[in-house]
Amino acid sequence: MPRPKTHDEALRTRLLDRAGELLSSEGAAALSLRKLAADVGTSTTAVYSLFGGKPALVRALYMEAFRRLGTRLQAVQPTGDPAEDLTRLGIAYRDSALADPHLYGIMFGGHPGFEPDEEATAQARAALEPLLNVIAAGARAGVFPDTTHTMAMGCWGIVHGLVSLELCGNLPPDMDVAATYERALRANTSGWRR
């Protein structure tokens, strides 16, 4: 009878989440494989078995962050109205950041010594494909100008900026963030309409 697999996907996910928490709350110096393993209740052998070492762990964390973002954006079902779909993607982007704030900085804040390789870069870009697809559909329908990449950068800048302000605690404490965020998305979308 084969031995049961002890280093499974659930352990891998727990290690990635805890590594993201350590990096986002305490910085790169806090990411020790020994501390990570102890925090998750496993051994450093498990970390090495699953990731091969710290550089591969950080790479896997980067890819997992974009995988989760991409999954949330891809789950937004098209309504047939590109402007509404664009707003809904922006809301899904914020939802993803709030669900995994410990991964948000990994995607966009960098990690000392880590440079995404070709595969990791491709996964990061693929996560944002739903945005490009909605904008391109809107351009084909005559709703948006035919400047897909320029518009995508502008829309991404808006959501990234607002989400970053929220996650860093830089918004007024009495602000209805969700409502303000949605109004900003709708105003941005309206500004891009033909």
Image: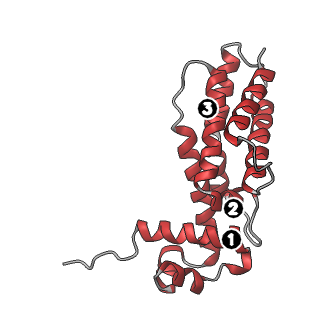
Which residue is at a point 67% across and 54% down the rendered structure image?
Answer: 121
Residue behind mark 2: 106
Q: For marks 2 and 3, give the CA distance.
A: 24 Å
* Residue linked to disc 1: 23
Residue 170 percent coordinates (x, y): 81, 53
Residue 71 percent across, percent down from the top left? 53, 45
Q: Residues within 10 Å of mark 3 (few under 14, many from 20)?
A: many
- Viewer-proximal residue among 157 and 122: 157
Q: Which mark is residue 88?
A: 3
Q: Which of the 4 image quarters holds residue 114?
A: bottom right
Q: Is residue 77 visible?
A: yes
CB under 8 Å between discs 2 and 3: no
The quadrant of the rendering that contains the C terminus is top right
* Residue type of the residue flagged with mark 2: Ile
Badge count: 3
Q: Specify whether residue 123 is in view.
A: no
- Do callouts 1 and 2 mark residues in contact (Cβ within 8 Å)? yes
Report whether 101 appears left or right of 160.
Answer: left
Q: Residue at x 74, y 41 (%)?
A: 159
Say which quarter of the image contains residue 95: top right
Tag 1 secondary structure: helix
